[in-house]
Image (cartoon, rainbow, N blue to C red):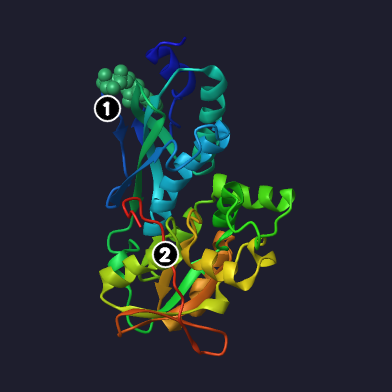
Amino acid sequence: MLSEFDLISQYFTRAPRADGPIALGVGDDCALLMPTAGMQLAVSSDMLVAGRHFFADVDPYTLGHKSLAVNLSDLAAMGARPLGFTLALALPEARAEWLAPFAAGLLALADAHACELIGGDTTKGPLNICITIFGETLPGQALRRDAAQVDDDIWVSGTLGDARLALAGYRNEFSADLHMTGDDHARAATRMHQPTPRVALGMALRGIAHAAIDISDGLVGDLGHILQRSGVGATLAVDSLPPGPVLLTQAQAFQRQFTLAGGDDYELCFTAAAHQRDAVLAAARSAGTEVTRIGCIEALSGLRFIDANGALLDLQLTSFDHFRTT
Ligand code: ADP
Ligand code: MG
């Protein structure tokens, strides 16, 4: 069995890049960061708990990826550039067969975003992964939830619903109506286990988009946060939502339910003035990410749904809430 310090030095200690923003990384009482002069620090934490956010026996490589991806996604939703992150880890036991792939998945994504592991804490206990991430953004240009304006377009990046579809497969939900081959389920499951944080898109939307949020608990619930914080309402054109490629093969009722109230998508939902449509599309192209216009911000509070003919739809949806009991 590895000691706590062997474990940290073997799996979680790397020298920070000399030309980067980390003056001192893992190994001292604190890490030291040097944000670019004049920038604002963006800070966010996310905790992943075994049995709640992931299955305890999930592949450790993808778990390492997802643990950091959900935090990078929060930076993306603010339009912030990643600087570094800390990792607080509770582990039932220190097993190399688990730690090596977990660290590999985590650090591969960290490298892809030049976001360094700068410290953390390690303790024995039920598996629990808490990452705090640090980024920087231009003062006045962060994409805040409270900044949506009446008549803004509503946009979403990528596709929605495949992660939720994968979960339905694992849970054997709706088994009479859901039809998925093993290959389809594997493709959808990749969306669930290895989400792609839209960091480049978030940064490219600075100065163009008004409000943004990343979709972790389902589009309706997360867009609802923008509406509430901005004091506005919205109409969503349900048939313009982009279902994931696997979800596209399912019945329309599932497509609507899982795009609107899925979860684990980690796409960006953002608003921008209608005169910025070309700028939004150019930003998306520069980031290599598709975006789709899905609705409009309105003064009337509440969220309305329309179909392709503009007719109002009465949809009953619920989005995920850890503390809701019904
Ligand atoms: P302290 O007693 O000051 O809390 P620790 O002994 O817990 O320090 O940690 C020693 C060093 O290792 C610190 O720099 C800490 O940030 C780092 N560290 C601890 N756990 C992790 C981890 N899981 N990932 C990265 N760095 C870690
Ligand atoms: Mg400690």
Residue 216 x, y percent position in the rendering:
43, 55
In the rendered image, which residue does mark 1 sit on? 30
Q: CA distance from mark 2 to mark 1?
A: 42 Å
Q: Amino acid at mark 2?
A: Thr
Dot 1, crowdedness within 10 Å: few (<14), some or many (≥20)? few
Q: Nearer the viewer, residue 9 or 131?
A: 131
Which quadrant of the picture is home to ligand 2? Answer: top left
Kindly identify the residue that appears in the image at 59 percent across and 60 percent down. 288
In the rendered image, which residue does mark 2 sit on? 318
Q: Nearer the viewer, residue 116 or 310?
A: 310
Kindly identify the residue that appears in the image at 56 percent across and 90 percent down. 309
Figure disc tally: 2
Per the image, label 1 sits on a secondary structure element best described as loop
Asked whether, in this view, residue 267 is left or right of residue 40, the answer is: right
Q: Nearer the viewer, residue 272 or 260?
A: 260
Residue 208 x, y percent position in the rendering:
41, 71
Q: Is mark 1 within 8 Å of ligand 1?
A: yes
Per the image, label 2 sits on a secondary structure element best described as loop
Above/below status of 145 relative to 84: below
